[in-house]
Image: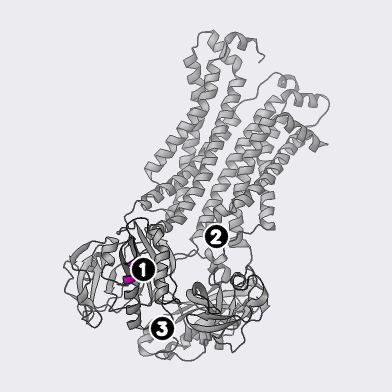
Amino acid sequence: MGLRYALRRFRRTPGFTLAALLTLALAIGANSLIFSVVNAIFLRPLPYRDPGRLFWATEFMPAFKTDVLLAPDYGAWKQQSTSFERLEAMGATIGANVAVAGGPAERVPVAHVTPGFFAMLGVTPQLGAGFATNADASVAIVSDAFSRDVSHADASALGRSLTVNGEPATIVGVMPAGFLYPGAADAAVWLPDAVPPGPATPGRGMRGVDAIGRAKPGVTTEQARADLERITRGMDDQYPPDWKAPHAGARANVIALQQELTADSQKGLMPARGSARAAALVLMGAVAFLLLIACANVANLFLVRAAGRRKEIAMRYAIGAAKWDIVRMLLGESLLLGALGGSLGVALLFWGRSAVKFLLPKALGGAIPIDWRVLAFTALCSLAAGLFFGLLPALTASRVNLNARLHANRSARLPAVLASGQIALSLVLLAGAGLLIRSFLLLASTNPGFDARNVLTASINLRPLEMYGPPQQVEFFNRLIAGIEKVPGVRIAAVSSSPPMAQFNVIGSGLRPDNGPERQETVSFNSVSGNYFELLGIPLISGRFFDSRDARGQPKVAIVNQTLARDFFPGRDPVGHKIGAETTIVGVVADIRHRSLDDKIWPEMFLPFEQSPSSWITVFVRGAGDPSRLAAPIRSVAQSIDASQPLFDIDLLEQRVAGTLLERRERAAVLAAFSILALLIAVVGIYGVMSYSVARRTQEIGIRMAVGAGRGEVLRMVAGAGLRITAAGMIAGLAGALPVTRLLRSFLYGIAPSDQTTFAAVCAILAIAAFCASYLPARRAARVDPVIALRLDA
């Protein structure tokens, strides 16, 4: 009966119902949307058997300033550990040239795992079988998506022949659809990789692996770490002399697999894999503020509505209704409205997942699941919102003096307080969004140090190395560049082993300026063709560029950037000086931002490609017009040289640069969208409060005008009340925003969390919006006819 009555009341006030429903749906939907990401990162178990017993095991190597587990240590761990039921390894997921049954080669993400890896996770192939204990690289397991591409959705992928970087393999298994590989979400082919235990010797096993183990029941993280640390210390004497010192400082580390896949820590030179995790928590706080603003707004609507129902409530008291009956009736209406708003919010949840997909760490794949936790959270938000915005108006409306209530108006103080609260919370959100937007704009205007316009890039990785040793690498790339430069529309082409806007090759130690003491510094080294600097417009500071004098077999030379010159040769021109015993510096070029626009400038050393060739290079092509039209012709040039060596990652250099800003732009855009929504809700709240105030004070305004008050005075009086509400909210908002914005420090570039320009702009925006919201009711008040106003009942 109560439900039907509440629905009838809502139908009688469609404007009120629509405004409240829309406000709640947007706020609850936004909260559920961000919570779905938080759920995927923190709460949803990994899709493996008993995932709570899976741990990521590695070592921190101070000599390399990063985590790296050397294969000999892994082998010893696997053989001697007493804490793990199984301990398996996986190598880095890299692109490989994969051809199916003699077809053209394509670039495919390939990973190497020990044969027991999938069994350790508790995942079995949906077709075929896993790797046998003694499996070698002649067999492969593929992803469901890769299998469907190969077999056109039938089971014939099993037994198909592949060549991976020129080596043959046969498909023996197909993983289930949606399988989450902990090494990389996009892995498509897995090959077995045996890592036998044994001592570390020169030429054996000096490579890094990642280890995942299934701990024995009851084993804690600290117990597992201590166990592996014991084994690590026992390996100190197993390494050759030049590895003893670095290994002696190695420290075993064990963390939960879920924590590793969503980690926020930045390791070594790699970007933080889990920076999206912190962003999700920041946005969770933002949408919680949004929900509070929405609840305050709807509470104001209910207060205004309750004031209009004072006669109805008084009549209910008169015929015997108890106070609790009134509260229950009004609270039931608010809970119903909250439930309806939550139901509409679920639609926003399903519709908006693609907009926040960037928040999900890449290691967890690209899908944001909607499970019972998310739906339960949505229901809880709906219930909490209904109680929050309904309880206070219900209690206020139930306080009725039967004799006075029929003709008395209620004080407007409570709606004004709620409106000020909305302004305060909106200011906090706007300040955060403003800081992120200003930070993004500053970063986007940063000069990368090179000219990215009209440049097309494409990568190639020559395999197998038995066919493509250093002489063959030089020959291939000379032919490739010569062929590309003949393509109509190409102005110039160059190659680089470590392109801008990507991870770079690293020298961690061993650099001796002028044969002096060895420098333990991180330096990027890059093999480039002679016209690389001309193509990218990198200025020459001193010396010369590479030319024909720097061919293979000639004296070794290098070009360095300004940062390396300043660090290694302070106060002098490094041209003519040596790095090491053999390499002479012939030029100094301007600095560029290599990895991203917000990264620091690293010391860089450039080597002539013919003297230091690489099997993996990036081709740069500067076109006379739109360079994207050159993609097909340069791919044809590469195929004409060797069809088994495909070009991949073909992209505009400008897009590579823009890609480094993508996450910042998306974070700023999402927070800005929530902030603008909060501002609109707050402005509507001020408008509602002022409209209600004008309606309540119509007779008072009429009296003022009857005794001589002018329209301007009335306009100032009403608009001033709105601005006082805004000012109070802004003062409270500033007090709250200053500590809250410090949480954004790691997301900012070039500005402080208390940036005065941003806060001034936010306050100006709020003041203008609040003035507009107050002006319309004020103008309506100034047009009140005193004669009509004086005839109204109080």
Of the two numbered discs 1 and 3 on the same chain, state the one appearing first in sequence.
3
Quarter residue 692 falls in: top right
Dot 3 amino acid type: Leu
Q: Residues within 10 Å of mark 2 (few under 14, many from 20)?
A: many
Of the two numbered discs 2 and 1 on the same chain, state the one appearing first in sequence.
2
Of the two numbered discs 3 and 2 on the same chain, state the one appearing first in sequence.
2
Residue 776: in magenta span: no
> With 548 as the anchor, is 163 left or right in this view?
right
Position in image of residue 335 (x %, y %): 72, 41
Considering the image in quadrants, where does the C terminus appear? Answer: top right
Q: Which mark is residue 324?
A: none
Position in image of residue 286 (x %, y %): 54, 48
| Disc 3 target residue | 465
Dot 1 amino acid type: Val
Position in image of residue 271 (x %, y %): 43, 65
Q: Disc 2 or disc 1, which is closer to the eye?
A: 1
| Disc 2 target residue | 360
Dot 2 amino acid type: Leu
Secondary element at image label 2:
loop
Considering the image in quadrants, where does the N terminus appear? Answer: top right
